[in-house]
Amino acid sequence: MGELSVRELPLFPLPEVVLFPQEVLPLHIFESRYRIMLQTVLESDSMFGVIKWDPTSKSMANVGCCAQIIKHQTAEDGRSNIITLGQQRFQILEITRSTPFCSAMVSWISDENIDDLQKLDSLRDSVKEALGDVITLTSKLTNTKKNLPDKLPNNPMDLSFWIGAHLGGPVAEEQQRLLEERNTFTRLQREYEMLDHTRKQLAARTALKESFPDIKEN
């Protein structure tokens, strides 16, 4: 990501979208200001910031994730399809430009060092177990075959980012909180609580289905 801890970064505000490190995000670029932004970043280091936009309050979050363009294709009409990969998280220090697209001075952020690595690894294992149970119970309820990825991250921080990125439903606010969290243990603990709650709900529904197989769920 470079040695500088502070840099200027073009920003791409997106409603209800939270990008996490190492996650792939495809984007369709069609607005003229973002076509200009795309051309600008492709001429430099192919980096820009993805940040959650709240259309109700008309405001941006303060923490986002840097996206690196790994593939791009531009049509004759000027529209582009790009594939990006989440890199390091950042915090906005100051908006430096608002037209034709927004740019800001940002500082890179990372998780705090954790002393008790054994406790962290134990929590990681509990999270993986809860995640596996959720997948298994969901498969039973829906009569479909669902599997976890073969290469689920083993590093606790990477795992916490992966789970944050794959939460289901309209969960952008929760994802934003997880992205902003700077303690891996705290992030994983919050995710374990969510997974455990879901696991218990699914287990109850599965037990009901097995006890009363003729009852259809709404």
Image (tube, grey):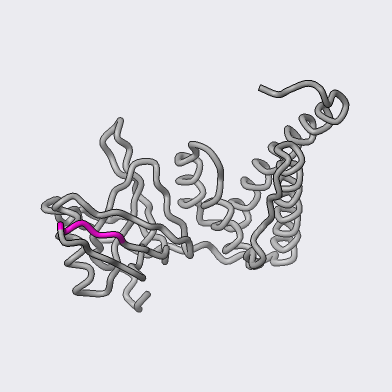
Image-based side of 43 in relation to 168, left or right? left
The magenta-colored residue range is 77-81
- Look at the magenta stretch and give its main secondary structure: loop
Picture coordinates of residue 188, whole percent (x, y): 63, 53
Report which quarter residue 66 is drawn in: bottom left
Residue at the right extreme, as displayed: 211
Residue at image position (37%, 63%) is 84
Report which quarter residue 213 is drawn in: top right
Picture coordinates of residue 57, whole percent (x, y): 29, 32
Task: Classify 68 as above or below 31.
Answer: below
Q: Is residue 138 magenta?
A: no
Residue at image position (17%, 66%) is 39
Picture coordinates of residue 63, whole percent (x, y): 38, 52
Residue nearest the viewer, comparing 51 with 96: 51
Task: Classify 177 as above or below 93.
Answer: above
Task: Classify 64 as above or below 52.
Answer: below
Picture coordinates of residue 184, whole percent (x, y): 59, 58
The quarter of the rendered structure image containing the C terminus is top right
| Label total for image | 0
Residue at the bottom extreme, as displayed: 3
The quarter of the rendered structure image containing the N terminus is bottom left
Residue at the left extreme, as displayed: 99
Q: Is residue 79 magenta?
A: yes
Residue at image position (44%, 61%) is 24
Residue nearest the viewer, comparing 128 with 4: 128
Image-based side of 13 in relation to 145, left or right? left
Image-based side of 201 in relation to 36, left or right? right
